[in-house]
Amino acid sequence: MKYVTLNDKHIALGAKMVSFAGFNMPVQYEGVNSEHETVRNGVGVFDVSHMGEFLITGDKALELIQKVVSNDASKLTDGKAQYACMPNETGGIVDDLIIYRFSAEKYLLVVNASNIEKDWNWISKYNEAIGAEMRNLSDDYSLLAIQGPKAAEAMQSLTSVKLDEIPYYSFEVGPFAGVDYVIISATGYTGSGGFEVYCKNSEVEQIWNKVFEAGAPFGIKPIGLAARDTLRLEMGFCLYGNDIDDTTSPLEAGLGWVTKFTKDFVNSDQLQKQKEEGVSRKLVAFELVDRGIPRHDYEITDGNGKVIGKVTSGTMSPSLKLGIGLGYVPTELAALDSEIFIKIRDKELKAKVVKAPFYKK
């Protein structure tokens, strides 16, 4: 078991701790629904220090990134971030990630905690022929996601960087909470705005304490991974290991928008062929028409008992008060308003395909 730097603090705050991606992580503090509402309407803080960070530098840095990721990182300018996935050689996805560009020869890749070793080995394999400089910073850095519509106002007293002027998927490196060099990024996986701040492990406790001091008048609260999951699902954001994995194509998963065929990358020829010929299944967002809660791995049927797919993510939406989910279905049933059924305890409950996000501000 691995432990984030603030492990003892989460326990002292009464967090329910669970094993997640090999880390002891806070899954909830006072309850999923109240934590969810805190982020949707105010400001909350997630400790997501389990995530992985790889520094790619040198004159070959961009060449390596372009080879292993689906998106076109050459479009990035200094201070910009980009969402992408890493395709494997058999049509699936190694991981999804965020690429940060600091300069033409310095990039940070932020990857999922469960895939740190796998991703490092995968990128290293392709780097043998390219020769970029790689450093795995995952064990040295912490990451706090300060999320919600009040995040910028609540945190402004901690920095001279004008937080409300950082565009979405952009970042600045500057002073924050008494630490001179912090990456302040207008990113997050909640759909409610806010920031992610990257700092050294030795700095994170000071930052955490000052964040909660500054946020107290705004009702700031610590938020666990359970609410992070309901928040991202309401936005229709994919979770690696659920909605995307080594067997799901980026095009099946609706990630064609980060799959750019303007360059050569791992398996790009096969994926381009798949784009031209079309896919046989697609990841769809659905809402239950009948009352119930869809869960991961529940069967999706045609209403006559025939299994046509599986739920990859599902929950009772705290914002909408109805069952929502994602799952793969045959392409002919992927159109909006298509009727599908979710098998819950031997009952086939009616659902309809909808356009993500489920939650509209």
Image: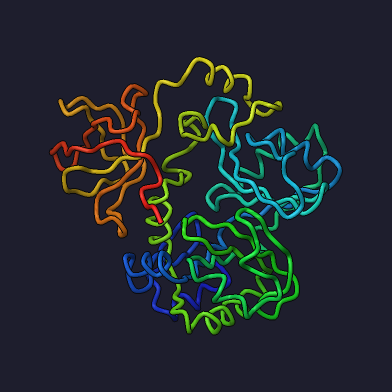
| The furthest residue to the left | 347
Side of 275 where 16 appears, left or right: left
Total label count? 0
Residue positioned 40% across, 34% down in the render: 283
Residue 190, image x, y percentages: 46, 57
Task: Give the vertical position of 281 relative to 148 (above or below).
Answer: above
Q: Quadrant of the C terminus?
A: bottom left
Task: Give the vertical position of 322 relative to 261 (above or below).
Answer: below
Which colour style is shown? rainbow
Side of 328 where 89 appears, left or right: right
* Frontmost residue, 18 versus 305: 305
| The furthest residue to the top | 277
* Frontmost residue, 93 versus 271: 271
Residue 237, image x, y percentages: 45, 46
Residue 224 placement: quadrant: bottom left
Task: Give the vertical position of 30 relative to 328 (above or below).
Answer: below
Residue 260 placement: quadrant: top right
Task: Give the vertical position of 308 relative to 228 (above or below).
Answer: above
Side of 302 where 241 appears, left or right: right
Residue positioned 28% across, 27% down in the render: 308
Residue 166, image x, y percentages: 65, 61
Side of 131 where 151 appears, left or right: left
Residue 217, image x, y percentages: 48, 84
Residue positioned 66% across, 55% down in the render: 170
